[in-house]
């Protein structure tokens, strides 16, 4: 029972604060890029963060090094969540958000990493910069993909569960706590009991949660056996892959890379008639496949870890291409 207490606390806190935020009056109003057509409460991500932080406080006593890492992770996630909350309330310009997230990414790279082995030994500064780029890219990918009910949950809950099983040490219990907090929020956001979610995470949830997950995956990559870095990336492939492949396609078409658009694969599916529930189910399936590949890779040598990563990337690339081809055949502009 004692081992389950942090998970129960994380789930219950996220569930309760989600109920509160539905009545708090912070509303996401549809615009031309939205995939929803009615005003919807947002800010549910605060429940995820609060649930995770409470669970951390209830975890069994850690070693000084693990305790310091988890405390640093909580601080970075909290600052990212606060930045997102301010953006939810006041709509911050892109420059301060970019600077804050870049600083958080480098700080977390130092706290949870950095990764200094990537086939060859890396100088510390190069490892720090590359690891910071991983955190920054992951946080932005989650934020970009947070546009369909339950989609982020469908990816991050399986990823956190797999990380909880494979990560061990200080990563495992914290990852399971994050999964529990996400599950509490899923009651309000995932299109399970209703066709559409009734509460959005907001930027507070997207940025805060993505930084927490990136930090835990980074910790595993930095402390795990050789080749674990490939598995950390594979965990979040359904999100990162859609963002990076869509950017590449838009670049080939001569589009401005960072201009607003609705060309991600999940958006193309919605534009061609798929429900939010179906899209979430597809990404959940993709995440479960990636999770299974991660568990297979974690049981073998570095060469197997790289092999399952390549298999995952190849499979997702084929899926992404099929979605785009079908959307184009339906008359959709697949680059805009």
Image (cartoon, rainbow, N blue to C red):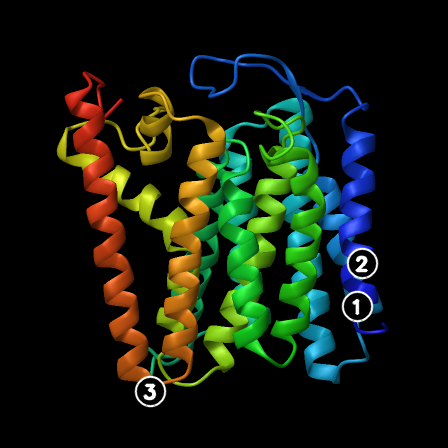
Res. 225 visible in picture: yes
Res. 147 visible in picture: no
* Element at label 2: helix
Q: Is residue 64 left or right of residue 28?
A: right
Badge 1 crowding class, 10 Å Cα cut-off, few under 14, some 14 to 19, many 20 or more, is few
Please say if the residues under marks 1 and 2 sit with CB atoms less than 8 Å apart.
yes
The residue at 29%/70% (across/down) is 308
Badge 2 crowding class, 10 Å Cα cut-off, few under 14, some 14 to 19, many 20 or more, is some
x then y, percent, for residue 286: 38, 51
Q: Tell me the mark number nearer the camera, choosing from 2 and 3.
A: 2
x then y, percent, for residue 205: 63, 41
Disc 3 or 1, which lies upstream in sequence?
1
The residue at 72%/49% (across/down) is 49
* Quarter of the view holding residue 3: bottom right
Task: From this view, report whether residue 322 is shown above or below residue 327.
Answer: below
Please say if the residues under marks 3 and 1 sit with CB atoms less than 8 Å apart.
no
Please say if the residues under marks 2 and 3 sit with CB atoms less than 8 Å apart.
no
Assign the C terminus to one quadrant of the image.
top left
Disc 2 or 3, which lies upstream in sequence?
2
The residue at 65%/38% (across/down) is 204
Which disc, if any, is residue 8? Answer: 2
x then y, percent, for residue 156: 53, 52
C-alpha gap between disc 1 and disc 2: 6 Å
Where is mark 3, residue-wise?
301
Where is mark 1, residue-wise?
4
Q: Is residue 203 left or right of residue 252?
A: right
Q: Tell me the mark number nearer the camera, choosing from 3 and 1.
A: 1
* Quarter of the view holding residue 128: bottom left
Assign the N terminus to one quadrant of the image.
bottom right
């Amino acid at each position: 029972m004692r081992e389950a207490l942090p998970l129960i606390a994380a789930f219950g806190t996220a569930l309760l604060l989600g109920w509160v935020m539905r009545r708090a009056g912070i509303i996401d109003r549809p615009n031309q890029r939205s995939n929803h057509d009615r005003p919807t409460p947002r800010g549910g991500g605060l429940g995820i963060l609060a649930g995770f932080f409470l669970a951390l406080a209830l975890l069994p006593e850690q070693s000084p090094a693990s305790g310091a890492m988890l405390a640093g992770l909580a601080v970075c996630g909290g600052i990212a969540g606060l930045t997102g909350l301010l953006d939810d309330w006041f709509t911050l310009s892109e420059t301060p958000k970019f600077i804050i997230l870049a600083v958080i990414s480098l700080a977390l790279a130092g706290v949870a990493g950095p990764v200094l082995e990537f086939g060859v030994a890396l100088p510390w500064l190069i490892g720090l910069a590359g690891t910071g780029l991983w955190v920054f890219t992951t946080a932005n990918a989650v934020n970009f993909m947070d546009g369909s009910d339950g989609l982020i949950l469908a990816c991050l809950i399986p990823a956190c569960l797999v990380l909880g099983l494979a990560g061990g040490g200080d990563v495992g219990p914290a990852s399971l706590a994050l999964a529990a907090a996400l599950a509490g929020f899923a009651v309000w956001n995932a299109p399970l009991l209703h066709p559409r979610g009734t509460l959005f995470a907001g930027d507070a949830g997207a940025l805060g949660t993505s930084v927490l997950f990136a930090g835990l995956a980074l910790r595993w990559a930095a402390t795990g056996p050789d080749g674990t870095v490939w598995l950390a990336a594979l965990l979040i492939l359904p999100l990162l892959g859609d963002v990076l492949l869509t950017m590449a396609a838009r670049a080939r078409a001569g589009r401005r890379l960072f201009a607003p658009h609705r060309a991600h694969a999940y958006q193309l599916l919605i534009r061609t008639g798929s429900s939010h529930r179906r899209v979430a189910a597809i990404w959940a399936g993709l995440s479960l496949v990636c999770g299974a590949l991660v568990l297979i890779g974690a049981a073998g040598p570095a060469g197997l870890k790289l092999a399952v990563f390549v298999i995952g990337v190849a499979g997702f690339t084929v899926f992404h291409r099929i979605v785009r081809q079908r959307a184009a055949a339906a008359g959709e502009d697949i680059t805009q």
